[in-house]
Amino acid sequence: MGVGGLAEPVVVVSLLAGGVIVNRNTNYKLFAKRGEMPWKEKGNDDEVRSSRTSSSDETAVEDDDMYSPMATDSLLEDGYLTSPAAAEPIWRRREVGFWKFRGSVVSPNTRVFKDTFLSRLLIKLPFLCEVWYWALIYWVYQLGRAVSALTLVEGTVNVARRHGLQVIHLEQKLGLFLEPAIQKIFLPHTTLMPWINRLYSFIHIPATIFFLVCLYYYCIVRNRVNERQDGKEVGQSAGSPAGAPLFQARRRTMAMCNLIAFVIFTLWPCMPPRLLSDPNAQGADATEGRAYGFVDTVHGADGDASYWTQNKFCNQYAAMPSLHFGYSLMIGLTVATLPLNARHRATRPVTISNMRFHLPSTPRLLCLLFGFFYPFIILVAIVSTANHFILDAVAGAMVCGIAWKGNKFMLNLLPLEDYFLWCVRINKPRSAC
């Protein structure tokens, strides 16, 4: 493991910390003096209005009037269960559903803890919620991989090798078995190949976190009603037509990608191309695997492996599907289709040979170029380093598509989140996430 592998955790932590600072709520005072309102200017009313339009993770419309001492049992219809004497509803209803099934469950209303220090801290630093979500999604996924890795037996390794060869045989039938040829193109370039190794090892997690930080800022921070922007007065709608629902959908898409991928590689372990060249493996399948000549450029003596993948708790037989490509495709599609300000959506008329064309604006063109080249570069990296087959990337794209369309399934976990937040006495502000 090189210096890059050791520095990667520092980069990840720095990006998360930077995201918390950049996306802080500048209109809220965490340590307000006695008798002083914590909201600057007219921020409290604006925060309420912003919260009504900035969260799709909540299924019921919340209004401060719902939490007045005059609240009655009529709140049952709006998703809350309370008593006439209660200042806050004790319970709330959450909608749950899958496919055509729809129902509701009762869960605690954590707003009773809205005045605790940790709850107010989340109002000031709302991106802390996203740090928690990312850590939960990532480490649950890694824990699943670790359990799979620690319970591997020799028979599973042989099955994974057989599945890897099955992928090759299918690619040969489809005319897609190009991995050896692609790797041979890059191997002679001794200056370029180390950078491709680093790209594969160190871009996946930091780039994903950086994407989340930037998307949160663009979708939520810039859309706060009470944020001052160029050419706008405080209280006017902010610049980006994208909002919290877009960010939340992409965060849930990542969680769904991890869930689907975990199920697939647990039920169908697949050996990556680089491990097919294991010189110590025995048997006909091992002999065939070595015949393809794959070279492990990342994990070899001169490689530069990631800290997160170079340990005994990492499942080396989770090549199918490729989340490297699935995540990059999700990021690329999000940037390419990102809603832009009206002045950035304008097209540019161009006349060529008396034919008039309308080219996209420069911001839209940059979004389209990034949306194409980022997943394309990642695809080249995962294939040229022999870490994934082309069909692994195809499977990753399919997982991304399924997660993109079905990400609302993750909303079924909100009742569990309510119980967890109740236990730790924290209220998650609506406008935070």
Image (tube, helix red, strand yellow):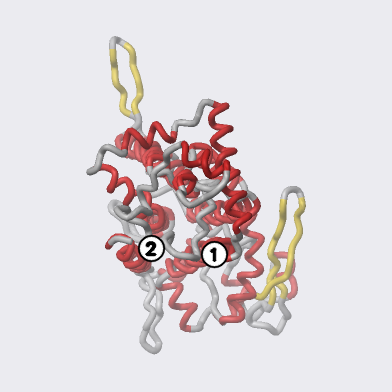
Judging depth in this view, the residue of 46 and 201 nearest the camera is 201
| Residue tagged 2 | 307
Residue 58 quadrant: bottom right
Tell me which amino acid carries mark 1: Ala
Percent position (x, y) of residue 228? 32, 60
Q: Which residue is drawn at 47% across and 41% down?
A: 290
Earlier sequence position, callout 1 versus callout 2 = 1
Q: Mark 1 points at which residue?
A: 146
Provide residue 331's location: percent of width, then percent of height: 44, 47
Q: Where is residue 165 in the image (x, y as percent from the top left)?
A: 56, 39
In the picture, residue 184 is in which quadrant? top left
**Which is nearer the eye, 293 or 146?**
293
Q: Can residue 48 be seen?
A: no
* Label 2 element class: loop
Name the residue located 49 percent from the left edge and 49 percent from the top edge. Answer: 323
Please name the residue shown 42% across and 41% down the image: 294
- Location of the N terminus (image quadrant): bottom left
Q: Please, what is the three-letter code of the amino acid marked with disc 2? A: Tyr
- Image check: 286 left or right of 3? right
Q: Which residue lies furthest to the left in this view?
A: 191
